Image (cartoon, rainbow, N blue to C red):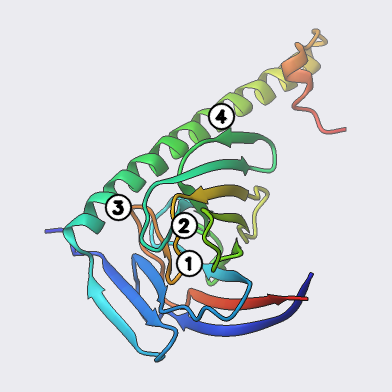
Amino acid sequence: MTDTPMAIEVNCKTGAVVERPFTAEEIAQRKIDAAAAEVRRAEEAAAAETLAALKASAKAKLIAGQPLTEEEAATIVL
Amino acid sequence: MPNTMTLIASQTLSTTAASITFSSIPQTYTDLKLILSARLSGSSNVGGTIQINGVTSNAQRVIFGTGSAVNSEQNNLTGIHNSNTYTTNTFSNSEIYVSNYTSSNNKNYHYEGTTENNATASYIGMAAGVVNTTSPVTSITTLAAGDTYTANSTFYLYGIVKQ
């Protein structure tokens, strides 16, 4: 069973700190936020994979003396 | 230009938490600055949203950089923090700035943050948003999206008075 996420509230007026479980509405919003974060993670992973492939291709072509595409050349830091 | 920056409240986590809210914010300053030094329990460094006065619908634009690429997005994700794959005992550094928080206009904020890691990759996130509330800001919440902040993550809320 998944643990209920906990919220911490700091009252700036009194200094009181309360720890409480998320409400149903907060849990629902948390799922929406998690889905958005997952979309970004997937985009990051895809971008990283593309970059790695371009670098590998650029390296192979340099070794073989073959011309690089503009995208491959852009992966080289000068 | 800021004239004074005063610590309103702070919180250092002794255990994990999914969100931190600063409530009953005094209305005696001009702007607010929330500074986070945070680490996430999960394996992804993507994981934060912000709520002002509990409002969940922000119109936000995000710039997200990896050090070798930059993306531009439209979502509510503000936070980029160290994940559990990062160097042990390291935390990200972020700040959220809310200007004119007592005004009767919709509330504008910006976020910027960077990770800290003994590795070759580095991440920075920047976001600008508008929250559809004309009420004075009385609470700010930072949430770990689908994740939790680890123990020893810190959150400091400052009030800024302009000259």
Circle 2: residue type: Thr
**Which residue position is annotated with label 4?**
A47
**Residue B48 disc label:** none
Point out the tag, 3 or 4, that comes first from the N-terminus: 3
Q: Is residue B162 above or below residue B70?
A: below
Q: Disc 2 and disc 3: Cα gap in Å?
A: 24 Å
Binning the other alpha carbons within 10 Å of mark 1 as few (below 14), some (14 to 19) or many (20 upward) gives: some
Same chain for the residues under marks 2 and 1 in the image: yes
**Contact? badges 1 and 4 (CB < 8 Å):** no
Q: Quadrant of residue A27?
A: bottom left
At label 4, the amino acid type is: Ala
In the rendered image, residue A50, in percent from the top left (x then y), is placed at 58, 24
Report whether B68 appears left or right of A48.
right
Quadrant including the C terminus of chain A: top right
**Residue for badge 1:** B136
Mark 4 neighbour density, 10 Å: few (under 14) some (14–19) many (20 or more)? some
- Residue at left offset 59%, top offset 48%: B127
Q: Position of residue A61 (x, y in %)?
A: 75, 14
The residue wearing badge 2 is B134
Residue B108 relative to residue B47: left or right: right
In the rendered image, the residue lying farthest to the front is B104
Which residue does the image show at 68% across and 49% down from the upper left?
B120
Parent chain of label 1: B
List the residue tagged with mark 3.
A30
Mark pair 3, 4: CA separation: 26 Å
Q: How far apart are the two marked residues, 2 and 1, measured between alpha carbons?
A: 7 Å
Q: Secondary structure at mark 1?
A: loop
